[in-house]
Amino acid sequence: MATPSAVEGLIEALRCLPGVGPKSAQRMAYHLLQRERDGALRLGEALLHALSAIRHCRQCNTFSETEVCERCASPARDASLLCVVETPVDLNMMEQTLAYSGLYYVLMGRISPLDGVGAREIGVERLIERATDGLVKEVILATNFTNEGEATAHYITAKLNARGISVTRIARGVPVGGELEFVDSGTLAQAFRERKACGG
């Protein structure tokens, strides 16, 4: 018996999610239709609501329901520090550390020539405008330590240095609580290169 076209449409739509192949999408579709019709309705309504209500914050470019997000509007944040991350998920991870009280800029991507993503596609010019607003004293690059993340950091550094903006990069190294025997050699080498003085 042929699969109803509405089911095929649902399966195909679910495949847009990262890491979801044809079989996973099929399992999800049948699960929603067989056992979670109420959940499927809630999911559909939540998606429609999010798509209509969510926009980009005018200042930091993260997702927000208001023109300027709560974080950017907070007087408790240090406006002289601007941390650049690739995604809203990365921003959330930074916030969970409780180690940073400045503001952010979310690129919503990274420079990746092989994927046809350049500086224009991730809005680097908007970042430059934001970083040169007269309030920002230091830009902290917290892009990922992938080839694309490094290329993005290098490009942004060159652009900002040319405008006299101080740029720093988060350090790489051994994870807290990590044991050297379980750390890969690349991370260990980087930690060695970025060693700091001890004591007074």
Image (cartoon, grey):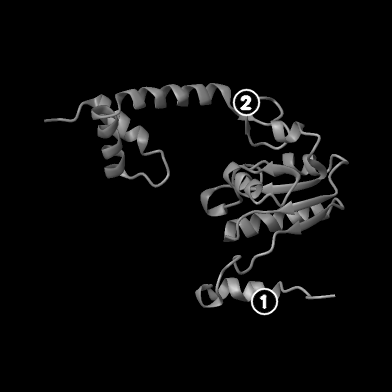
Quarter of the figure that contains the N terminus: top left
Residue 69: horizontal and vertical position, in percent? Answer: 69, 31
Asked where in the image residue 8 lies, by quadrant, the reply is: top left
Marker count (numbered): 2
Residue 93: horizontal and vertical position, in percent? Answer: 60, 48
Q: Nearer the viewer, residue 183 or 155?
A: 183
- Upstream in sequence: badge 2 or badge 1: 2
| Structural distance between the alpha carbons of marks 2 and 1 | 43 Å
Residue at which label 2 appears? 65
**Which residue corresponds to the image point at 52% horizontal and 25% vertical from the top-left?**
51
Q: Secondary structure at mark 1?
A: helix
**Which residue corresponds to the image point at 64% horizontal and 72% vertical from the top-left?**
190
**Which residue corresponds to the image point at 57% horizontal and 52% vertical from the top-left?**
112
Q: Nearer the viewer, residue 37 or 108?
A: 37
Q: Amino acid at mark 1?
A: Phe
Residue 126: horizontal and vertical position, in percent? Answer: 73, 39
Residue 70: horizontal and vertical position, in percent? Answer: 70, 31
Q: Amino acid at mark 2?
A: Glu
Q: Which dot marks residue 153?
A: none
Q: Residues within 10 Å of mark 2 (few under 14, many from 20)?
A: some
Question: Is 148 on the left-hand or right-hand side of 33?
Answer: right
Q: Nearer the viewer, residue 97 or 17?
A: 97
In this rendering, the answer to whether 33 lies above or below 120 is: above
Residue at which label 1 appears? 192
Asked where in the image residue 34 lies, by quadrant, the reply is: top left
